[in-house]
Amino acid sequence: MVILEFLKSMIDNFGAAVIVPIIIGIIALFFRVKPQKAFLSALYAGVSLEGISLMVGAFTPIITPLVKNMADAMVNITGVNLNVFDVGWQATSLVAFSTSAGMIYLGLGIVLQTVLFLIKWTKCFQPSDLWNNYSYMVWGAMVIFATDNFALGIACMVLLNLYSLLISDMLAKRWSTYYQYPNCTIIAMHNIEPGIFAIVFDPILNAIGFNKLKLNPQTIQQKIGFMGEPMTIGFVLGGIIGILGNLSNLGSMAGWGSVLTAAVATAAVMAIFPKITGFFAQAFAPITEGARKFMGNTGDREWYIAVNDAVGYGEPATLTCGLLLMPVMVLIAFFLPGNQTLPVVDLVAIPYMVEGLVAVFNGNMAKVIVTGAIWFSVGLLMCTYTAPLFTEVAKGAGYAIPAGAAMITSFNILGKPLMGLIFLAFLSGSPLWIGVAVVAYVVCYAGYRMKQKNVEEYLETQAMKNAEAEA
């Protein structure tokens, strides 16, 4: 328990921008990268993650009040008052790491993920993205709180981890190819999960012609010149969000000051993010080379290192789709039958949430927006259903519920339909439903391992069917 306390203390005090570079440095040395290069790899990773954190940290307080204003305007128009408030993934991670279940899985997860990689159960090395394990912890903590069965909660976390690794294995090559990070992929359960819906829904979208729509930053820029530049697109989208968030204040200078601030801030994010993530690419160049030599002596095994999903946030199609979906999801929240969740803080996390969609669709923004709106709408219902339980867990962990909020949730972490179904199986305590969840994983895993190359070829073929591939 002392070791777990030490690990938790490290995460609490250092954060991802320090923990991840330390792990990357260790990985580099393991692959026999020279100490100087290993240190620079770690430093590049730390600098890029801290830069991303500073950018998102500065962007969030500009956009969040505008979203809240949009929501208030919708309350006045529709008379609908949503009583589940989205407090964001940051608050959720604090709750997760504050539970006893989270403490246990912090250590168990590292061991499990390392062993699964070493025995070739998975081709993704997950411990390099240790920070995002809190996603499993939240679901497991809720199972334990509701059932008072610690073993059941831990088992839920393990199965969720296995499912997310399976999805990551399926999408690893596609993500690596699209985002141009050799032998890297995202592993966070809450942001890789939508990729499954993209795979299933893609043939339907192609059948109705979505693959022929040339809607991505490159083709937009070719057609409308400087207006299609990512920075200009950011300015326009930020301005639209600013106007929607200041509808009752457009007659004042303060209102237009808010609009233009949002426009310039969004333009800055679109322009600066790709440069910051370029540092992250440099962090993995020596590791990739060293790993290829090392793996060449072990049978030339296919492998991917899990990276923080922040590295894909600023990719033009990813960020543009995320920005477009922000007002869309607020609007949907007020008209979706059965929904009580108001997405607020995690709206800024939507660019993280669409990375799996963007990779599968090869940057086809029309597909990403339609698929994202559908999948995230189902996610709102999952947030609504789990909100009472999560609120109690958060209270037990010492989290202060915001004034005016009856219940809380995280749109990004708990708005996951597939993972939510697995959680519900364990929440029921029924051996039948838990067995179904386990058997479904075994069948899917066995099927994927037998047809792995076919799956990768299928995803590449589907990706190339998009008109954007020609650009």
Image: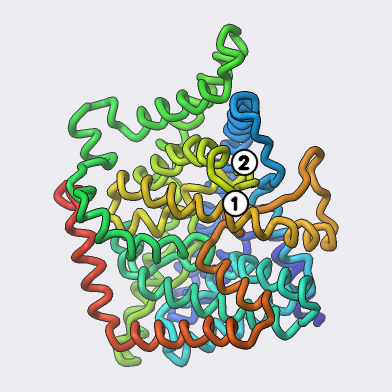
Q: Secondary structure at mark 1?
A: helix
Q: Locate residue 167, reporting x and y percent.
A: 42, 72
Q: Relative to the observer, which residue lies in front, 371 or 293? A: 371
Left or right: 453 as drawn, with respect to 254: left
Q: Secondary structure at mark 2?
A: loop
Asked which quadrant contains residue 179, the reply is: bottom left
Q: How many marks?
A: 2
Q: Which residue is mark 1?
A: 411
- Disc 1 marks a residue whose amino acid type is Phe
Give the residue at x 81% y 80%: 2
Asked which quadrant contains residue 16, the reply is: bottom right
Name above or below for residue 116 compared with residue 223: below
Do the numbered discs 2 and 1 sit on residues whose CB atoms are within 8 Å? yes
Give the residue at x 60% y 49%: 338
| Distance from the alpha carbon under mark 2 to that under mark 1 | 8 Å
Q: Is residue 163 visible?
A: yes
- Earlier in the chain: of badge 2 and badge 1, it is 2
Give the residue at x 28% y 48%: 364
Q: Which residue is mark 2?
A: 344
Q: Locate residue 63, reporting x and y percent.
A: 57, 33
Left or right: 148 as drawn, with respect to 323: right
How packed is label 1: few (under 14 Cα within 10 Å), some, or many (20 or more)?
A: many
Q: Relative to the observer, which residue lies in front, 339 or 264? A: 339
